[in-house]
Amino acid sequence: MKITTYYKAILILAVFCFTFALQGCGSGDKSRAAEDMTFIGSATQFVKVQNGFPLGTHAIEQSLIWNAATQKIDVFFDATNHSDDLYVEYNPVTGEFTDNQWMDIHVRFPYTVYDEDRTEWITFGQQGVGDQFDNQMRAWKSSNKLNWTALNSYAPIFDHSVSENWRYIWNPSAVKVGGWYYMLNDCDSVGNNGIKTGLCSSQCRINADDTVTCIQQAAQAIPHGGCNWIGYVAGKGFIAIIAEGSSGSGVWEIGAATSPDGITWTVSNKFRIKQAGVHLCDPHLVETPYGLYLTFSFDQWDSILYKANMTLAELFDSL
């Protein structure tokens, strides 16, 4: 059964990110069409599949996961103004969507991955309803994507005292490599400030007893970066698609970064999507047998879906 028009719009055209940018991610002119964007380097390989339109709700697409068993993309959302979380399945061949499935947790900016070793889904994020949420990162597990159990006895997984950069944290991303989750999350010392916001890196391990052990890096891994996706290419290293705000344009642009170890990152000048006066942020990427799918938000109002006929390894090499 196809999803309703309303939630179908949410899936492809969802608004994405928390207002944290230099001017605030949603502060631009929403009347401007998303047709004046400039694509640089390997970003030119991405072709638009869908364009968005304004929605009167707050629904943030947080994770794209290729599900080999169903041959569909699992798409997870932070919906209804951060009050509820849901997922849908998207068929890249037919373009059809399943009905929305509401999850029994309330996590702000959840980032969900499938853990093949544990054969269950893992979500990282902050507990809360609406704009009322705590400044703690936690983790949950699920065997069916609907019912979730807290890991680490619901205790926070990060220590705020590691450095000033870890005083405020949000928007995690994670990829599992060699038994550890390599993570990037928005962080700053003053609380959602565009000047100081960056991405901090950490490595977390979920132990057999469901406790979580994390190693946090004190310095910001990517200053002026945020709202990101992280992946890994065997034999090459880590790759991140990020919202990046160091160009001096006053707005966020979609960029890319690579890392040999998941700790030290270098922002590439060979991948960039930008538009004058408009914030582009909350990028998410997934590799499928049909190519790479990229989503990002247009001024936290519209969202855009792109596809490239290339592999993640090819994208990595292009950077």
Image (spheres, rainbow, N blue to C red):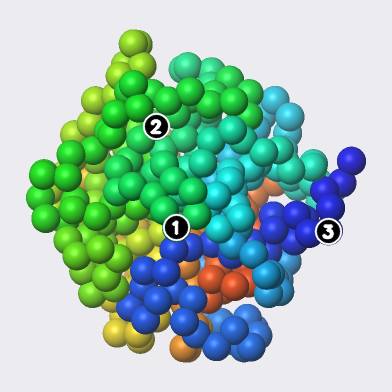
Measure the alpha-carbon separation of dots 2 and 3: 32 Å
Q: Nearer the viewer, residue 213 or 240?
A: 213
Local secondary structure at mark 2: strand
Across and down, in percent, residue 138 comes to 35, 35
Q: What type is the residue that disc 1 sits on? A: Asp
Q: Mark 3 belongs to which amino acid?
A: Thr
Task: Report the mark closest to the observer, 3 or 1.
Answer: 1
Instruction: Say left or right for 198 vs 174.
Output: left
Placement of 261 over or under 258, stated as above or below: above
**Outermost residue, top direction?**
209
Distance from label 3 to label 1 (Cα)? 26 Å
Q: Looking at the picture, tell me which residue is in the foreground, 88 or 132.
A: 132
Disc 3 on helix, strand or loop?
helix
- Which residue position holds label 3? 5
Residue 215 pos. (x, y %): 19, 34
Dot placed on the residue nearer the N-terminal end, 3 or 1 = 3
Q: Is residue 80 visible?
A: yes
Residue drawn at (30%, 65%), measured in percent from left and top?
Answer: 192
Q: Which residue is mark 2?
A: 139
Would residue 80 appear left or right of 252 to someone viewing this image?
A: right
